[in-house]
Amino acid sequence: MNAVDLVIIVVYLAAMPVIGVLVGRKQRSAADYFIGERSLPWWAVCFSIVATETSTLTVISTPGLIWAASGNYNGLTYLQLPFGYIIGRTLVAFIMLPRYFKGKQSTAYAFLGERFGGAMQGVSSVAFIVTRLLAEGVRLFAGAIPIQYILSSYGLHTQYWQIVVVLTALTLIYALVGGIKAVVWVDVIQLSVYILGALIAVVVLATKLPSGWTSKASDAGIFKVFDFNFDIAHLLTSQYAFLTAVVGGAIFTMASHGADQLIVQRFLACRSIRDGRKALIGSGIAVTIQFGLFLLVGAMLWAHNGFKTLKELNLKGDDVFTRFITSELPVGVAGLLIAAILASTMGALASALNALANSTVADLYQRFTKRKAADSKLLRHGRIWTLVWAVVFAVFASLFTSKDNPVIEQGLAITGYTYGALLGAFLLGMWIKRARQLDAIIAFVATVAVMAFVVLGVKIAPSPGGKPVVLAFPWYTLLGVLITLVVGGLLSLRHRGDDPRAAEALSTKPDPAEAEEAA
């Protein structure tokens, strides 16, 4: 690392909060703070969705996914997962978006409140909060990994928790002041910068690779995209199996982009349902291209490192790209890419802070106080909760101390506890009109309990005599959805007719008063 790189990193990290504050400093209402008064362009929302789901996890871990922990190579098979993402987002765009754009909803869980009642809205919001707290804790910790590596090269030995606190403080500045507008526009800048950095890394690597490397990569299976091994044990335990990645990935993204307030809040900031669909489906295409770019970087790093396995390199998959950036990229480029990686962590954290504050105020505070608070008071509460969640995130992220497993897989697996229950609750409300609030709550709690047992305790032997492994994370959501629908559906049979709430909640027609106001 050069002093120029360090200056670039410092300036960039300082500039992002300043830009965020300038963009979003004129907040007029709680609706402006949380969903930008539904005035943001779809392409900016699309880029924000991609940046929000990316963070440091994708940037530092995805190139390393070329290698398998077993010593073999996964190749490009991880690309199958975003293929499923496109399918899942398309389904969300046409099945779930109409429910969200009805009325003046600002959170995903307002639909569950209309369909079942306030208690179900509260339960789902609490589940979202816990899930985000755990998942973003991993992502924030991941952002501290390359920083510690850089600082140690300068002889500055820091603890992860110290880096986490600094990142959180920088993020809080613009998330607290600027709201969703600041978050979205800073995301657009950050996405542009780290994609540019990855492209520069490809160009630099291309000048360093030996001739004939593509033939060797093809022979070694580095360019393999599809895994059509349909052995049942392989399908259940490998996230790289075709059916697991595409089917499981589609259901997973239906939950992450249709039942998780972190993403739902984004497309609710669009000007219309049509723009929301463009942003959502476009993000699936964009993230597939992004995964392809970072996997290409991984393939080129494999060739650059002498066609060696991770064991031969004595490295973790998460460290391969970080080492290349800090030791071999030209002066200035390394600093820019590291800064963008760190800023992507800040962007993901800012998104989580705003979404958590939104859900806390709209789904919990307003529901359980049953007060029609003044808009200025809701805006103040939103900022207070943004501050509270920033402190909580810093504490949780500081608890992570091990990076033995690829952090991208850790982050995705955490959602297995609740994603199936969240998506299942939405589908239960839409498909089973007999289901009441108590049915939904019991089904939700039962699903979370069963999934906790599955994630923590169920092991599968992939082959006779093989070491037992856990169920592949893409199946967690599908299993959770099935449990919720079965339990909730059976409980609904106790009732003679449809829930009186169902007809109005499932209607996508706007209220006459709202239609007149819109006109």
Image (cartoon, rainbow, N blue to C red):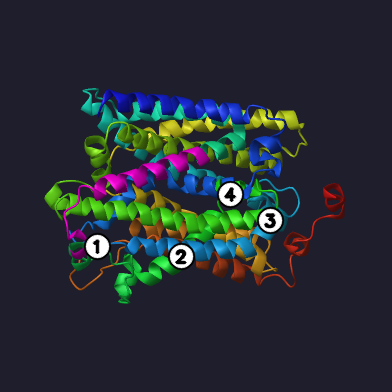
Q: Nearer the viewer, residue 206 or 183?
A: 206
Cα distance, mark 4 to mark 1? Answer: 33 Å
At a point 52% along the width and 64% down the height, the residue shown is 88
Hey, what amino acid is under mark 4? Trp
Task: State which quadrant residue 399 falls in.
Answer: top left
154 to 87, vertically: above or below: above
Residue 84: assigned label: 2
The residue that mark 1 highlights is 222
For marks 3 and 4 on the same chain, the one whose residue lies earlier in the sequence: 4
For marks 2 and 3 on the same chain, the one whose residue lies earlier in the sequence: 2
Hey, what amino acid is under mark 3? Ile
For marks 3 and 1 on the same chain, the one whose residue lies earlier in the sequence: 1
At a point 24% along the width and 62% down the height, the residue shown is 222
User: What kind of element bears circle 2?
Assistant: helix
Picture coordinates of residue 102, whole percent (x, y) = 74, 55
For marks 4 and 1 on the same chain, the one whose residue lies earlier in the sequence: 4
The answer to whether residue 267 shows anywhere in this view is yes
Cα distance, mark 3 to mark 4? Answer: 14 Å
The number of numbered discs placed on residues in the rendered structure image is: 4
Do tag 4 and tag 2 residues touch (Cβ < 8 Å)?
Answer: no
The answer to whether residue 116 shows anywhere in this view is no
Cα distance, mark 4 to mark 2? Answer: 21 Å
Q: Residues within 10 Å of mark 2 (few under 14, many from 20)?
A: many
At a point 61% along the width and 70% down the height, the residue shown is 489
The residue that mark 3 highlights is 273
